[in-house]
Image: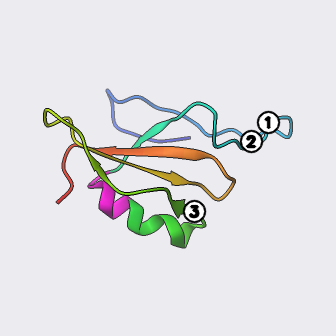
Amino acid sequence: MFNCEEPATRGAVVHSPSMTPNGDGVLVYLNAHPTVDAALARIEEAGGKTDGPVIKLPQDIGYIAFFIDSEGNRLGLHSRTNG
């Protein structure tokens, strides 16, 4: 379970033997607090790998980046600032 303070959205990661990791499935973005760079710095030591550069989005939407987790799923990261 992902804990958070109200009124935030909660979630969970669930394992099921009938599901297999997939890099081509739904792309879930996670909040990269405090920055995308800070989150990416922890990815490899946690068993994942980065998947491309940090991308600055237009209109001050923020920054995104992608990574492959230790099970082979491709995920996105987002933060409003990155510096």
Which residue shows up at 52% across the image and 44% down it?
A: 75
Reply above or below: 81 against 29: below
Toward which corner of the image does residue 7 lie, by quadrant?
A: top left
Name, please, the residue furthest toward the left. 59
* Quarter of the N terminus within the rendering: top right
Q: Nearer the viewer's eye, disc 1 or disc 2?
A: 1
Looking at the rendered structure, the secondary structure element under dot 2 is loop
Within-10-Å neighbours for mark 2: few <14, some 14–19, many 20+:
few
* Quarter of the C terminus within the rendering: bottom left
Judged left or right of residue 82, residue 14 is: right
Reply above or below: 83 against 25: below
Reply above or below: 62 against 40: above
3D distance between C-alphas at marks 3 and 2: 17 Å
Queried whether the magenta region covers residue 74, the answer comes back as no
The residue where tag 3 is placed is 48
Which residue type does callout 3 highlight?
Gly
**Where residue 25 sits in the image (x, y, percent)?**
63, 33
Q: Which residues are magenta?
A: 33-39
**1 or 19: which is nearer to us?**
19
Which residue shows up at 69% across the image and 38% down it?
A: 14
Residue 15 tag number: 2
The residue where tag 1 is placed is 19
CB under 8 Å between discs 1 and 2? yes
Looking at the rendered structure, the secondary structure element under dot 3 is loop
3D distance between C-alphas at marks 1 and 2: 8 Å
The answer to which of marks 3 and 1 sits earlier in the sequence is: 1
**Where residue 28 sits in the image (x, y, percent)?**
50, 35
Q: Nearer the viewer's eye, disc 3 or disc 2?
A: 3
